[in-house]
Amino acid sequence: MKDELLQGKIKQYDPAKGFGFIGTANGDIFFHISDFPATEGEPKRNERVKFIAVENGEKFKAIRIERVEDNSAKAKKSKVASHNKSITNVLLDNFRR
């Protein structure tokens, strides 16, 4: 598993402690918030990520974590609904004037 680019989903994250776990097909992998892209905010549960796993004692740790755009059918449906809502709001605002 070392030096392989893996993908998974954020399984849990504790902001008070600054660490969490990424669920993968090979099991859960520890991560620290310092290895997460800070400019994009804190990790959210079920968010898709890709990363490199390095040895951390007898287990592995995720480093160089990057967010992956969710292209699942559910995510696409949510994006379309959000887009349609914003268009509807603009049209209604123009109509009310």
Image (cartoon, rainbow, N blue to C red):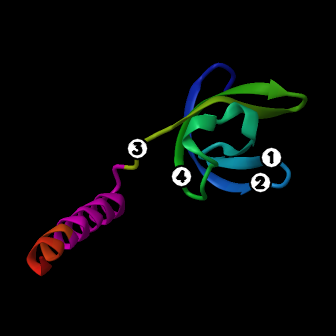
Q: Which mark is residue 15?
A: 2
Dot 3, how many residues are within 10 Å of its Cα: few (below 14), some (14-19), or many (20+)? few
Disc 1 element? loop
Three-letter residue code for mark 2: Pro
Give the mark nearest the N terminus, 2 or 4.
2
Residue span colored magenta: 71-89
Determine the CA span between mark 3 and mark 4: 9 Å
Distance between mark 1 and mark 2 Cα atoms: 5 Å
The amino acid sitting under disc 1 is Gly
Q: Which residue is mark 3?
A: 69
Locate residue 39 relative to residue 85 in the image: left or right.
right
- Between marks 1 and 3, how big is the CA–CA gap? 23 Å
Q: Is residue 77 left or right of residue 51?
A: left
Q: For label 2, count other residues whose C-alpha is less than 10 Å away and answer few (under 14), some (14-19) or many (20+).
A: few
Q: Nearer the viewer, mark 2 or mark 4?
A: 2
Q: Which mark is residue 18?
A: 1
Find the residue positioned furthest to the front. 97
Q: Are marks 1 and 3 in contact (CB under 8 Å)?
A: no
* In the rendered image, the vertical position of residue 16 relative to residue 87, given as above or below: above
First along the sequence among labels 1 and 3: 1
User: Residue 7 versus residue 94: which sits nearer the camera?
Assistant: 94
Image point (40%, 43%), residue name: 69
- Helix, strand or loop under label 4: loop
Q: CA distance from mark 2 to mark 3?
A: 22 Å
In the image, taking residue 86 as reference, residue 8 lies left or right, namely right
